[in-house]
Amino acid sequence: MNREDLSKKLRSLGITEAMEGACIMPEYAEAMDLVDAGEDMFGRPQKMTAETYAAWKQMRTSAAQDSIELKLVSAHRSVDYQCDLIQKKIEEGRDIEDILCVNAMPGHSEHHTGRALDLHAGDDTPLEESFENHPAFDWLSTHAASFGFRMSYPKDNTAGIDYEPWHWCFHPET
């Protein structure tokens, strides 16, 4: 998506030029070379980069050997999909400034890269801070880096995004 089209989409969501200019998160190009990565915990098809998928499978297998079942909630998201997520929250009556504390601005989401994964374990509600209390979070905190994953939004992060213990991004240099 070119810059002009992205700016139009952002304005349609109520994201002003000033808000866009103040965004400290880097812009991410949408990944084009994605592979099928099976279904998420809701049965939706997911895609990610081939390298991320290989690392995800290895990490999930290793966790299972330690009796930890990691579940995929979300992987690649297009800019359009990110816009749709934000639009739904606006329609629910939420304020755009508040939304941008929990959802990256379209064009600035690591999910666009095909390397970011939202993960879950257990039977409670996914994408909640309570995930930090699950043994899977402890396992990820100890082992994820050895598979190239790191938590992107720890407590007190500088990205302006609320704490997301479920959001892990593949960085092969990790």
Image: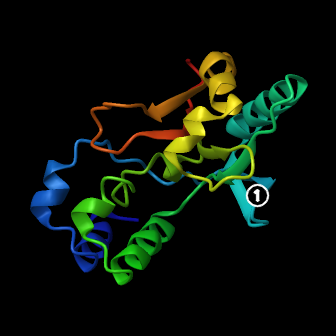
Amino acid type indicated by mark 1: Met
Which residue appears at 60% of the width and 54% of the height? 76
Return the residue found at the far left.
18
* Mark 1 crowdedness (10 Å alpha carbons): few <14, some 14-19, many ≥20: some
Return the residue found at the far right.
65
Rendering quarter of residue 106: bottom left
Q: On the image, numbered disc 1 is attached to which residue?
A: 41
**Residue 58: x, y in percent?**
81, 28
* Number of on-image labels: 1
Direction from residue 86 to residue 125 in the image, left or right: right
Which residue appears at 39% of the width and 70% of the height? 86
Which sits in the foreground, 124 or 28?
124
Direction from residue 146 to residue 15 in the image, left or right: left
Rendering quarter of residue 170: top right
**Residue 116: x, y in percent?**
56, 43
Which sits in the foreground, 162 or 35?
162
Question: What is the quadrant of the N terminus in the image?
Answer: bottom left
**Residue 139: x, y in percent?**
69, 23
Direction from residue 114 to residue 59 in the image, left or right: right
Residue 171 vertical placement versus 40 (above, below): above
